[in-house]
Image: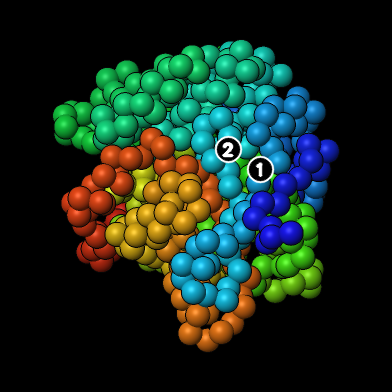
Amino acid sequence: MGQQTKYLLDESDLPTHWYNIVADLPEPPPPVLHPGTHEPVGPEDLAPLFPGGLIAQEVATERDIEIPEPVREVYRLWRPSPLYRAHRLEKALGTPAHIYYKYEGVSPAGSHKPNTSVPQAYYNAIEGVRRLTTETGAGQWGSALAFACSLFELSCEVWQVRASYEQKPYRRSMIETFGATVHPSPSPLTKAGRAILEADPDSPGSLGIAISEAVEIAAADPETRYALGSVLNHVLLHQTVIGLEARKQMELAGESPDLIVGCTGGGSNFAGLAFPFLGDKLAGRGAPEIRAVEPSSCPSLTRGTYAYDYGDTAGMTPLMKMHPLGHDFVPDPIHAGGLRYHAMSPLLSHIYDLGLIEARAREQRDCFAAGVQFARNEGIVPAPEPTHALAECVDEARRCAETGEEKVILTALCGHGHFDMAAYDRYLSEDLIDRPYPQERIDAALERLPKVDV
Ligand SMILES: *Cc1c(COP(=O)(O)O)cnc(C)c1O
């Protein structure tokens, strides 16, 4: 028998519970604060935006949270997802390192996002909600939520960041194919959108602005709730199916990871892969290094301060302690669209602050180079976001080639890049530049953080 490439699980191995890392942390995360009073928010403050089932998960402290059977039924359309050993990439790099990747591109939206859109739609539907609103940057989350809403008979309205609405028309078509409505953001449909358009009629938009618009519409209608595709605790919780499966698959491979690497936008795919392994590490089982990789052009973990900020541009969401670049951050038009949020998951920021994970920032051309090398050896064209993690894997594997170390590296290949070929086009025609984020802009944005005494 030749060397094994794919590690597959049976449907019966699909996790029955999500893993809540809060139960195992040495210190609980700081409280979420009301935007007006700066007092800790209670479940009732979140009720206009989220259903009770998700609010309960947002504040949950128990370790294992059952996955409802109707959600598992939908998960079975593509889960358990495959784990691969990248033998050909290892060979091309001449490295003794072992590189494994957990592939989430097999989902209906082509990324990890349906792992959370499905339970989010489910909990809203069973509580009688009729419509969900949301934002989308690259279009991945919009298509994942549109898919989930179509299964649970919810209507769905998506505010898509204008720059991406114009650059990625087929993501919009996909969202519409699943039955949702798409508005370019900023839009004239909301107060938040109109304010931005008055100041700058050509605004390319940002995730923070699109969130303000979706939140405004949801808060005004009792039959409508809002859904967020990353950042929040319940989203990270749902994504732990990735790491729970990967842990079993690494056992099948007879190895345990020395290094776990993932890309971070809001932190959900990285947390989803890493948290079950981090939980083991905190319990004294294994000691992998765990490393988040973000774009140099949106360096929230590596260069943002750990501080309270709003989750949206208009300042309507609660204040969360995270690693913000300022809630009025408008990113340069980089191509890893899913990594352009102005902040980072508060839970992941807390874990970073506790020193339990590391973070690095990378330039986009390096990332595309790794993406192309990966595609030519492994046959999958990665989404631009996970190429950040791949670039880190490639560098690490090259270091191992020098030292002879047989390091076991595990990464999340969180999506395919089939809707991102315009970005690859620009890379291949050498029309892509690196855009490190200027320090003046970081300093200026931190000046405008809300003043919170805690
Ligand atoms: C949304 C998205 C991301 C960024 O979000 P995280 O919450 O950090 O995972 C990364 N990669 C892909 C493919 C995405 O769709």
Q: What residue type is labelled 1?
A: Ser
Quadrant, the N terminus: bottom right
Q: Is mark 1 within 8 Å of ligand 1?
A: no
Residue at the image position 44 percent from the left and 22 percent from the top: 175
Q: Is residue 436 left or right of residue 42?
A: left
Q: Which amino acid does label 2 sit on?
A: Val
Q: Which of 418 and 448 is in front in this view?
A: 418
Location of residue 316 in the rendering, given as x and y in whole percent from the top left corner: 43, 35
Residue at the image position 69 percent from the left and 19 percent from the top: 127
Q: How far apart are marks 1 and 2 (CA)?
A: 7 Å
SS of the residue under disc 1: loop
Q: Residues within 10 Å of mark 2 (few under 14, many from 20)?
A: some
Q: Do the residues under discs 1 and 2 have CB atoms within 8 angstroms?
A: yes
Residue at the image position 58 percent from the left and 73 percent from the top: 97
Q: Mark 2 points at which residue?
A: 106
Q: In this view, does 433 lie to the left or right of 139?
A: left
Q: Mark 1 points at which residue?
A: 81
